């Protein structure tokens, strides 16, 4: 069974790039572009890992992680936060489901290594 990854990102070009790379690595990938859609997608798609941007329309990454932490069905889903705002990383340290932070622009090999580590596919 393929492991599922949800990309929550408002930039279409980043979604396309990450999807292409992760599908090539053998993952099933879906995405959404707003914070409001993210929680619903998580409940429908049941991802093994979420790649979560910080700055999103409607509900930001911190708000999404807070909701996840209060929802038993989502609180154990690992999250890798992605952002160009490196200074936002400390905001997420209080949430145990946030496993890593990946700054933009990405180094794709590093991002894939983090995904594999936190989804349980690390060699």
Image (cartoon, rainbow, N blue to C red):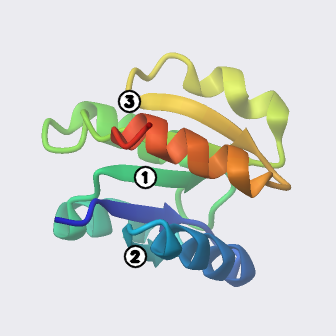
Other residues around mark 3 within 10 Å, as few (<14) / some (14–19) / many (≥20) = many
Q: Residue at x 18, y 70 (%)?
A: 44
Q: Secondary structure at mark 2?
A: strand
Other residues around mark 1 within 10 Å, as few (<14) / some (14–19) / many (≥20) = many
> Could one spot residue 117 in this view of the protein?
yes
Whole-percent x, y for residue 65 in the image:
43, 39
Other residues around mark 2 within 10 Å, as few (<14) / some (14–19) / many (≥20) = some
Q: Which residue is mark 3?
A: 97
* Side of 32 relative to 42 (left or right): right
Measured Cα–Cα span from mark 3 to mark 2? 20 Å
Measured Cα–Cα span from mark 2 to mark 1? 10 Å
Q: Which of 11 and 105 lies nearest the eye of the viewer?
A: 105
Q: Which residue is mark 1?
A: 50
Whole-percent x, y for residue 43 in the image:
19, 61
> Could one spot residue 60 in this view of the protein?
no
What mark, if any, has residue 30 been given in the picture? Answer: 2
Measured Cα–Cα span from mark 1 to mark 3? 10 Å
Q: Residue at x 43, y 52 (%)?
A: 50
Whole-percent x, y for residue 35 in the image:
49, 62
- The numbered mark, 1 or 3, whose residue comes first in the sequence reads 1
Q: Which of 103 and 118 lies nearest the eye of the viewer?
A: 118
Q: Secondary structure at mark 1?
A: strand
């Amino acid at each position: 069974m393929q492991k599922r990854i949800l990309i929550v990102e408002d930039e279409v070009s980043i979604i396309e790039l990450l999807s292409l790379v992760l599908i090539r690595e053998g993952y099933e990938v879906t995405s959404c572009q707003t914070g409001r859609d993210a929680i619903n997608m998580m409940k429908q798609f049941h991802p093994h890992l979420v790649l979560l941007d910080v700055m999103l329309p409607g509900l930001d990454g911190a708000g999404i992680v807070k909701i996840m932490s209060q929802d038993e069905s989502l609180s154990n889903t690992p999250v890798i936060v992605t952002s160009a705002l490196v200074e936002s990383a400390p905001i997420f340290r209080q949430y145990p489901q946030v496993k890593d932070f990946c700054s933009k622009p990405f180094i794709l090999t590093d991002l894939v290594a983090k995904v594999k580590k936190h989804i349980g596919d690390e060699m």
